[in-house]
Image (cartoon, grey):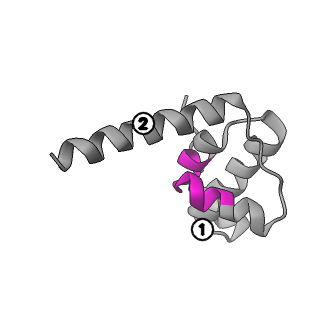
Amino acid sequence: MSVLVSEEIVRATGKPEEEIRLELAIFFYQHFKVSAGKAATFAGLSRIAFWRELAERKIPLHYDVADLEQDVKTLEEFREHYHAGNQ
């Protein structure tokens, strides 16, 4: 399912679509426990940029075992890629 922010909503809020998507992503993160990665993707941001946005708003991170496992996997892929490029 895709979420479409209609031109009518954009005009009614007076906010750019990117800002509306960010607000929705934060809402999903806080109220529906959507992961930071998925919320960041929805907002069109990197996970780090999304975390920064949460920090600026003083919204605590939800960082669980699944997040840790994903980060470990990403680091392992990076390490493999880095070592493959240096051989």
Front label number (2 vs 1):
2
In the rendered image, the quadrant that contains the N terminus is top right
Residue 77, quarter of the rendered image: top left
Q: Which residues are magenta?
A: 40-51
Question: Is 15 above or below relative to 32?
Answer: below
Q: Secondary structure at mark 2?
A: helix
Image position, residue 2 (x, y; %): 54, 35
Image position, residue 73 (x, y; %): 48, 33
Q: In front here: 9 or 22?
A: 22
Cα distance, mark 2 to mark 1? Answer: 37 Å
State if disc 1 and disc 2 touch (CB < 8 Å): no
Question: Is 76 above or below relative to 6?
Answer: above
Report the residue at 53% width, 46% height from top: 41
In the rendered image, the quadrant that contains the C terminus is top left
Number of numbered tags placed on the structure image: 2
The amino acid pointed to by label 2 is: Glu
Q: In front here: 32 or 35?
A: 35
Residue 80, quarter of the rendered image: top left
Q: Secondary structure at mark 1?
A: loop
**Residue 13 part of the magenta segment:** no
Circle 2 residues within 10 Å: few <14, some 14–19, many ≥20: few
Image position, residue 30 (x, y; %): 81, 44
The prevailing secondary structure element of the residues shown in magenta is helix
Image position, residue 65 (x, y; %): 70, 29
- The residue wearing badge 1 is 16
Q: Which mark is residue 76?
A: 2
Residue 55, quarter of the rendered image: bottom right
Q: Can residue 56 be seen? A: yes
Q: Residue furthest front?
A: 87
**Residue 49 part of the magenta segment:** yes
The amino acid pointed to by label 1 is: Pro
